[in-house]
């Protein structure tokens, strides 16, 4: 086994230990409280990564060296790669980094491949799209980023606090269509149940369904990077991962709340199933009071309360800190700060009527419609083409400027599962899994 393989094996073992340590920290940190949706999602990711890493270690221990380095020739600007050894796809699946140490190492190889008389790094050819094209030439379509780097970006997108990590998600091909039954148990339409006497002719009823659907949209980030930055590989890796992932995360989260549905997901604030609670009579502009909060809470359909969260702009928080409900002997606070003796308050931002608060910049400023919402985000569905953004790099787009273009593409769609509010069995009240407070301008 060569030195490079030994280094990679040591790195895999270290990664495995880090994953196990992270899982242990999550478990120990939640001994006294329930696991959050983010905790559960992260544990599922860790389990998948542990299984994969163990397979990697076992495979390297059995084989020793997996990839052969085919000879390459470089003559002038006409550079071609030698045919790859059989089983290339198998090698790629066993090593998702395709031999690269980190994202900066990969980007540096891309930059070197574009210089005159340079010899193409053989690791790039392992990721070429087809053996029937000149896969070593970036002008034929560029080089795909190794799978592990794409997964790394996806982990950033799903970090704690991101709305994307809290919604329902499903893989799709190009579009998603599904039948929906929105009839309540007490509705007079759709399948019905009747008390019947012995020997009576049974009453009949039929199913009432609607069809919901959405098509994939495309989210793209294009980032030209100077050759000088490429020379410093570790800094490049941190820079690209951090900046691009933050932009992707923000765009998706903003669309979940405020998307128009045209070329992007349909946001909660624009959905027909949103329940908007009116302001109080003579309520001052740019305020939130206890009556607003109580009415929002009671407008959320009961079965969604156990999974609901408050989404709010941070400039709403000062309105909540002094908010109370008058009691028989003393006033009762609506907001409970974190660390309170009450276990319900042990969310990072405290709780409001027992439900966690999540400050988010996708919410509008104080007084505008959308500054505070109460939502069960599991009632919002996102369909995605791939589990994470797809990365590609080109050394030719900005060749005359001494830059390399790094592009991230993510195809996904999203919309609330409901097309309308829920009518009460008796009276005129309506409910929803998504409740907002009307403008108080």
Image (spheres, helix red, strand yellow):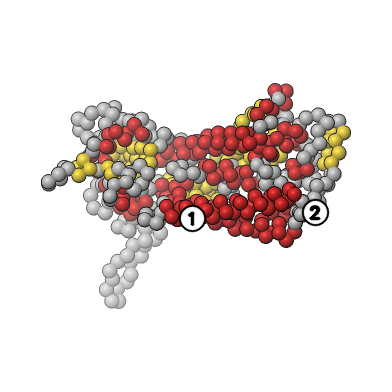
Q: Splitting the image into 4 quarters, where does residue 363 fall? A: top left
- Left or right for 35, reference 219: left
Q: Splitting the image into 4 quarters, where does residue 56 fall? A: bottom right
Q: Is residue 179 visible?
A: no
Q: Marks 2/1: CA distance?
A: 41 Å
Tell which tag, 2 or 1, sits nearer the viewer.
1
Towards the viewer: 35 or 165: 35
Q: Residue 95's x, y, as percent?
A: 69, 51
**Mark 2, residues whose alpha carbon is within 10 Å: few (<14), some, or many (≥20)?**
few
The residue at the point 62 percent across, 43 percent down is: 149
Badge 2 or badge 1: first in the primary sequence: 1
The residue at the point 83 percent across, 39 percent down is: 80
Numbered label tally: 2
Towards the viewer: 218 or 230: 230
Quickly name the residue at label 2. 86
- Left or right for 285, reference 18: left
**SS at circle 2:** loop
Quickly name the residue at label 1. 24
The residue at the point 55 percent across, 33 percent down is: 243
* Contact between labelled residues 1 and 2, with CB atoms less than 8 Å apart: no
**SS at circle 1:** helix
| Label ID, residue 343 | none
Towards the viewer: 366 or 217: 366
Can you say which quadrant of the picture contains the N terminus?
bottom right
Q: Splitting the image into 4 quarters, where does residue 440 fall? A: top left
Q: Is residue 97 above or below residue 283?
A: below
- Left or right for 213, reference 60: left
Q: Residue 145's x, y, as percent?
A: 67, 42
**Mark 1, residues whose alpha carbon is within 10 Å: few (<14), some, or many (≥20)?**
few
Q: Residue 280's x, y, as percent?
A: 22, 35
Q: Residue 41's x, y, as percent?
A: 48, 52
The residue at the point 66 percent across, 57 percent down is: 57
């Amino acid at each position: 086994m060569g030195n490079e393989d030994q280094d990679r094996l040591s790195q895999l073992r270290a990664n495995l230990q880090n994953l196990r340590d992270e899982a242990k920290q999550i478990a120990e940190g939640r001994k006294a409280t329930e696991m959050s949706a983010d905790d559960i999602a992260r544990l599922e990711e860790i389990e998948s990564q542990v299984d994969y890493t163990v397979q990697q270690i076992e495979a390297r221990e059995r084989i020793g060296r997996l990839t052969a380095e085919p000879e390459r020739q470089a003559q002038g600007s006409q550079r071609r790669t030698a045919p790859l050894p059989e089983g290339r796809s198998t090698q790629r699946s066993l090593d998702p980094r395709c031999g690269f140490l980190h994202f900066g190492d990969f980007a540096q190889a891309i930059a070197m491949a574009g210089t005159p008389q340079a010899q193409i790094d053989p690791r790039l050819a392992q990721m070429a799209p087809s053996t029937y094209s000149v896969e070593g030439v970036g002008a034929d379509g560029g080089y795909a980023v190794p799978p592990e780097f794409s997964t790394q970006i996806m982990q950033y997108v799903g970090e704690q606090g991101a709305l994307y990590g809290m919604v329902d998600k499903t893989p799709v091909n190009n579009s998603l269509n599904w039948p929906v039954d929105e009839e309540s148990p007490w509705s007079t339409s759709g399948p019905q149940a009747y008390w019947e006497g012995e020997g009576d002719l049974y009453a009949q009823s039929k199913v009432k369904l609607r069809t919901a659907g959405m098509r994939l949209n495309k989210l793209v980030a294009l980032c030209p990077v100077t050759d000088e930055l490429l020379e410093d590989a570790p800094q490049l890796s941190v820079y690209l991962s951090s900046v691009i992932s933050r932009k992707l995360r923000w765009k998706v989260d903003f669309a979940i709340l405020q998307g128009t549905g045209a070329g992007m997901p349909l946001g909660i604030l624009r959905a027909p199933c949103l329940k908007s609670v009116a302001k109080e009579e003579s309520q001052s502009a740019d305020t939130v009071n206890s009556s607003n909060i109580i009415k929002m809470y009671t407008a959320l359909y009961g079965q969604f309360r156990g999974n609901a969260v408050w989404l709010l702009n941070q400039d709403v928080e000062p309105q909540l800190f002094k908010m109370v409900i008058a009691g028989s002997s003393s006033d009762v606070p609506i907001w409970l700060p974190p660390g309170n003796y009450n276990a319900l308050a042990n969310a990072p931002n405290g709780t409001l009527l027992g439900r966690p608060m999540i400050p988010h910049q996708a919410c509008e400023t104080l007084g505008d419609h959308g500054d505070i919402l109460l939502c069960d985000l599991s009632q919002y569905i996102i369909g995605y083409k791939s589990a994470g953004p797809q990365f590609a790099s080109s050394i030719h787009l900005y060749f005359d400027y001494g830059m390399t273009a790094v592009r991230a593409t993510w195809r996904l769609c999203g919309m609330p599962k409901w097309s309308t509010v829920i009518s009460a069995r008796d009276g005129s009240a309506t409910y929803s899994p998504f409740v907002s407070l009307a403008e108080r301008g």
